Image (spheres, helix red, strand yellow):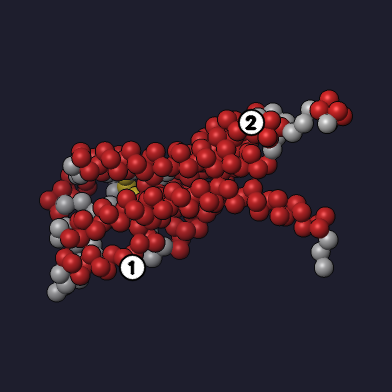
Amino acid sequence: MPSPARTAPLARALQIVAKPLLALGALLAVSAVVGFLHVEVQAIRGQDQALQIAGRSELGTAFEEVLFLPDIAVNTAGLAVLAKFKGRALPVDDDQQSDLDKSLGSDGEGRIFDLSSSLPIYVFLPELLILLGAALLTALYAGYATARSAGGPNQLVSAGWGALTGIVWAIALAILRAMSFVPSTTGDSVFAGALLIGTLAGAAGGFLAFGPATRGPSPDEAVHG
């Protein structure tokens, strides 16, 4: 039976890694709500040809979308971390598809900002703000929580602990994207986007987390405490 001294480092590592994973779960939940509502509205309006099956009504297609909820969450979270998409990211009106195609690059890839050419501003802007805001805030919190859990002697080390969010997010989102049935985001850009946003916002959260609870007692406090 492993001794507590041997299992303690592993338990501490798992405790630290759990913080960014929980924050990523929150991002996926927000992304699922935003993406699912968008897809459902388009399906009910009869503007979701990608999943419509011949002979099915708009309402039937809307029910079928529930089966793709995990994919919707992962794909929309990819958009939130500025990953590139190719093909069907968030469905647009049939008569706006040509406008979207024109805004994409020569390789047919684009980012969430390119959806502005094919979505009404009252749809695009709230979705953009919610998704980007959710990505930044959850990464900031992940860095803060990770640094508080890990501790550090100064703000630089605390920021380093927070920056681990980027690595954890990049690996986790890349795995989830690879497991998707219908991935619409590109794998390398998902990894890069999660790494960038998670590292920068996580480091900021770790920097803000530095304080008495993370730096530990000073030598004098340790002697007299």
Residue 10 point in image, percent of width and height: 72, 55
In terms of depth relative to the viewer, which is nearer, 36 or 173? 36
Q: Height in image: 43 above or below 195? A: below
Pointers 2 and 1 in contact (CB under 8 A)? no
Q: Earlier in the sequence, mark 2 or mark 1?
A: 1
Q: Height in image: 202 above or below 73? A: above
Name the amino acid, label 1: Leu
In terms of depth relative to the viewer, which is nearer, 72 or 3? 3
Residue at position x 16%, y 72% in the image: 56
Residue at position x 30%, y 56% in the image: 36
Disc 2 element: loop
Residue 200 seen in the figure: yes
Residue at position x 75%, y 52% in the image: 9
Q: Quadrant of the N terminus?
A: bottom right
Name the amino acid, label 2: Phe
Q: Which of the 4 quarters of the picture holds residue 7? A: bottom right
Image-based side of 122 in relation to 132, left or right:
left
Residue beneath label 1, please? 67
Q: Quadrant of the C terminus?
A: top right
Residue 173 point in image, percent of width and height: 48, 53
Residue 170 point in image, percent of width and height: 52, 48
